[in-house]
Image (tube, helix red, strand yellow):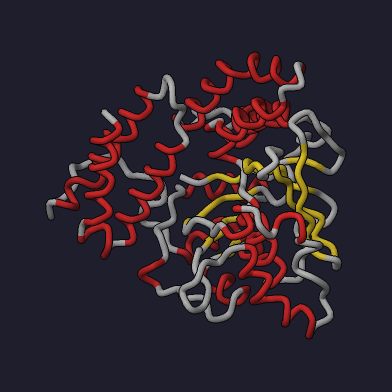
Amino acid sequence: MPPEVLHTFIRQLKESTAYKDHVGVRSVVDETVRRIAALPEEGGGPMLREEIRGLHERIVPLLHGTSAPKRKEKKGEGISSKEAETLIGADHFFGAEAVRKAFPGVPLKPEQIPAIPFSREDLQRAKELGDSLRLRVNKAPGNSKLNMQKMQELLQPAFDQKNEGNILYDTDWYESEDFFTEEPELCWVLTSDGIIPDSEDKDYLQQTEHIAEYLRDTVYQGKKIPQQYADAIKEMDSQKDEIRRLIDANKWQEADEKLANLKRNKLTRRVPVEVLYDMLVTFQNGDKRHLEDFYDWTCIRSSGGDLVDVGGFAPDGVYVGDWLPYGSGDGLGVVLARKF
């Protein structure tokens, strides 16, 4: 599909009544657009066609006011928040109530909450792994962006009153960075409770390879891995030798760019605002300092080209840093985040 045709198609979708009035339609379209943006510029044609075909199957009947064709049950259909909480366990469920407790006054009407995109089997397996199901929202009171800057502004007075320390530690170096004012995506996500086992003491490429192993050997052990992850693993396998060559040749900016754009990292790593959001929702619902002694290496680059890490949630505040791709550390790992 030519770029101009794709852009016209997406624009028409976003201008449609169904997109504006139906949160389910918005969720499907926005998630598909995000996945399309993550596709490689070269060689992504087959994956693009598959994304467009799936979008047509799910959305076009709704736009024309007809029923979608009969199909197999999709992940998450029929799963209420209450059932999801029961399946995964109350201590690992952070739904609308937890969000409102974390960010009082956040605009969140029932019809704005997206459908849970995971199957009962997904949630049962997540409970076995100790993972959490989280609702992420993107708007603050007043309908402004719920970005890192706004989170600090909203919650620091309450932290001061309770003598709980700082939200963020020394923001001087990144106050002008794009990621500081980026809002999270409105979605449900499954996250590991901490960094996944054996993801520390690895450089970024080794971590990325380890994510594939963890998905295949642990999360989906004995089962077929979802196609989007299988495609991402295939993409990674085709590029890892070149990325390693760039790292060894000290061409770290080229390596960073390739690593950040890998579909596997965009699908399973968090961005800085998501790390802080998850930390604060967890803390506001039980005083647990998530990643107090560890750092999550995200898929976002700083303006200097390095890959941003977020963690160390101590009373001094959450630390935000950045590393070269060949860096590693005993507390620098990756929290697995799964969205569909």
Residue depicted at 30% across the width and 32% down the height? 3
Residue 105 percent coordinates (x, y): 53, 81
Residue closer to the observer: 141 or 54: 141
Image quarter hosting the N terminus = top left
Say if 144 sits above or below 16 in the image: below
Residue 298 percent coordinates (x, y): 66, 44
Residue depicted at 20% across the width and 61% down the height? 17
Residue depicted at 63% across the width and 73% down the height? 102
User: Residue 41 falls in which quadrant of the image?
Assistant: top left
User: Residue 150 falls in which quadrant of the image?
Assistant: bottom right
Residue 85 percent coordinates (x, y): 54, 62
Q: Is residue 264 left or right of residue 161?
A: left
Residue closer to the observer: 9 or 213: 9
Image quarter hosting the C terminus = top left
Residue depicted at 57% across the width and 56% down the height? 133
User: Residue 100 falls in which quadrant of the image?
Assistant: bottom right
Residue 235 percent coordinates (x, y): 52, 22
